Structures are given as C-alpha cells and as structure tokens.
Amino acid sequence: IMFPYLALVSVTAGLSAVLNLKGRFGLPASVSTFWNTAFIGITLTCLTLGPRAWRAPERAAVVMAVAVLAGGLAQLFILWPAFRGLGYGIRWGLHLKDPGVRTALRRMAPGILGTGIHPINVVISTTLASQLAVGAQAVLFNANMMGEMVLGVFAASVATVSLPAMSRLVEAGDAPGLRASLASALRGTAVLAIPGAVGMAVLARPIIALIFQTGRYSAHDVEWTATTLAFQAVGILFVATGRITAQCLYALKDYRRPAYAALLGMGVNVVLSYILMKPLGTGGIALANGLASIAGLGFMVAGLRRRMPDLPVREVVGGWLSMGLAAGLMGLLAWLGARLLGLSSFQGLGGTSVRLFPLIGLCGLFYGALLLLFRVPEGASLAALLARKLGRKT
C-alpha cells in the first residue's frame, strides 16, 4: 500500500529543490506540516468514526498506510501550484540521453553514497544495541529521534538555504563572499544548535518523560533514554557543522569528499561503538555517533582548506566560544530551575508541561540576553527577528 509513497515523496523533493533554487524556502520547509495534518486527521477520523473492526491492529495498520499515502499527496498538491507559478512543468520519462540528466546522475552518485551511509549507521547502531539489555534498541531509537529533531530544526534549515547562496557565489567567482557566507551559515547554525544541545542534555529527563512516559514506558526507561540523549547531545554541533561544510563542498562541485567523509565516519563509529558500549551501554553508542562525526568533519575541512585556503576559522571558533559560554550559563539556570520546580519526577502531562515549558522559555530569553551582553552578532539578529515577529502580531 505504501510503495507509491516513494514516488510521491521523490517528486515532492524535486519540486522543493526547484523552489529553493528560486529563493522560495518557506513553503518547502513547512510542507511536512501538511503531511502530518493529513496523516493524523485521516487516522483519527477512521479509527474514531469508522467501523469498530478498523481498530484491530491489522486493520489499523492498513488505515495508517493509507494515511501515509494521503499525506504524500497533500505535500505534492501544496507545492504544485507554486512550482507551476514559476513557469516550470515536468516532462515525464527517463531522458537518459539528455546531457543535463547525465551530468545530474554523475554528480548524484557520490551524494547517494554519502546519504546512504546514515541509514547504514542506524542499522549498525541498532544491531549493536541488540547485544545490550532488553529495550536498548527502543531507547537508542528514541534518543536518536530527539537528536534528529534538534538537527532538523536548526541544521537542516540553514543547510537548505545556504546551498543556493554559496553556489551562486562560486559561479560568480566571489571568494570573499563565499567565505563570508560559509562563516554566516556555520555561526547561524551554532547559535541555535549549541543551546539546543545543552538544554536537551540538562532537561533530558523531563523532556523524555513528557513525551514517552505513558503506557509501558516506565520511569526506568525514561531515565535510561534521558542518559542516552545526554550523550547524544555531545555530537550535535559537529553533525550540524558537517552538514553545512558538505553544502559548501557541493557548491564547489566537490561531490566525492562528503561521501568519503561519511564512509570514514561509519568506520570510526563502528570501532568507537564497540569500545564505548561496554562501559556506557546505549550512551556509549550515542557518544560514538557524535565522536565519529568529528572525524568526518575533519576530513571535509581538510579538503575544503585546499579549495579555500582562507577558511573563516577564527570567526567561527570565536563565535562558538562565546555561544558556548552563554549556553553553559543557560544550562546552569536550567539545572537550578529543574531542581526548584521538581522536574526530576514526572508530575503528569499537565503538571510537567506547566513547569517545563516556562522554564525553557526563560532559559531561551536568558541565553539571548547573554548573547547581547557578549556582543555576539547573531544575538542581535535573533532579537531583531523576534521584534519583527512580535510587531506583526501586534
């Protein structure tokens, strides 16, 4: 039932790429919202208002499979008018003799290899986790999912926007502009990824409890997942930086080095996972993933330095230090707040929410104030963006 979804999501990705190329980022970035809306709406409607037989596990699985297809169609229908509005259409067919298609396929091959390494890494980590206590695979999966959420919100969005901009600068031969664009993308990712990682590590327990502590997910499972998530947070900055660095290499027409970096990271991940899983369990596997990303990042930076001898190392690392100090102080506030509010124990969905979300908001404001105090340029940019958003609402 779900097999046609592969075609739907592939076409949707192509439409998103065209819109991004033309500077239209908002709609492609929000398209997953329509998938979620369609999936949840159809699933709830069918299982709530449909025949009682649909609630059986076998029938419910079919209902959700159909809902996945509906979500894929919703994404496609949302993007199609904007795509057509740019004056483009689709000529269906293979067109393998077209020079543009051949060039695209040739450049895609290393990218497919590099992208395919990620699910292989997930399979390897899951297989290793199966050698640990019962439930380790689910714990590792849930921790990885939370980490990917932070990366998806911060790193993926900046990476999507940065690739067309850097590609245009490369085509124009604007080396100083490319350097400035790379520095801006790396700092722009870090200004949110660093506090996101710190906050996720410090508040891991109440966050995991709020999301998962229902049904069979016990307090022990929450503690286990929270510890794994804290180790997962170690590598978030390096994974995010690696994604931006890969985009810069793609803009420079270097498609192989990111793929080789992914292979290197996979090898390091396997070795470190075997070493760290014995003393740290699932936390060791999560930590190995983050440390392996450092190896891949170093390999890409070494290649990038050959193409761009004047890398913005000082600007980026200097920004990281200021952001790291601000995030560390924010983390201290989060830790103290969690203790004062009793977030170490689950107070139910409502009780935990009314304590956790205000604390997260307070920590965010505190972090922003520290950025302004430390005169970090991204802090002023975030403050200006927030002021514009609030001004529109008023």
Image (tube, helix red, strand yellow):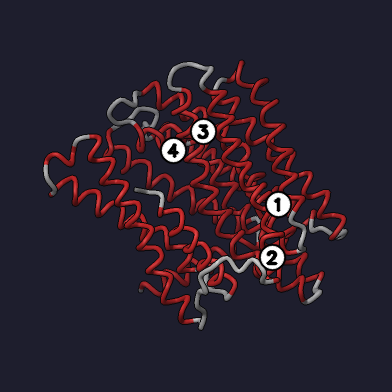
Q: Is residue 235 above or below residue 81?
A: above
Query: 270 left or right of 157?
Result: right
Which amino acid is tagged 2? Arg
Would you name the residue on which mark 1 appears?
110
Query: Do the CB atoms of the residues marked 1 and 4 lie less than 8 Å apart?
Result: no
Disc number placed over residue 102 in the picture, else none: 2
Whichever of labels 1 and 3 marks the residue nearer the N terminus, that label is: 1
As helix, strand or loop, the secondary structure at mark 4 comes to: helix
Q: Name the spot of residue 1 as percent of width and height, x first.
A: 34, 48
> Distance from label 2 to label 4 (Cα)?
57 Å
Query: 89 left or right of 352?
Result: right
Query: 320 left or right of 85?
Result: right
> Distance from label 2 to label 1 (Cα)?
14 Å
As helix, strand or loop, the secondary structure at mark 2 comes to: helix
Would you name the residue on which mark 4 appears?
337
Question: Badge 1 local density, few (<14 within 10 Å), some, or many (20+)?
Answer: some
2 vs 1, front mark = 2
Whichever of labels 2 and 3 marks the residue nearer the N terminus, that label is: 2
Whichever of labels 2 and 1 marks the residue nearer the N terminus, that label is: 2
Which amino acid is tagged 3? Leu
Which amino acid is tagged 4? Gly
Q: Name the spot of residue 217 as percent of width and height, x first.
A: 34, 26
2 vs 3, front mark = 2
3 vs 4, front mark = 3
Q: In this orientation, which residue lies closer to the viewer: 346 or 68?
A: 68
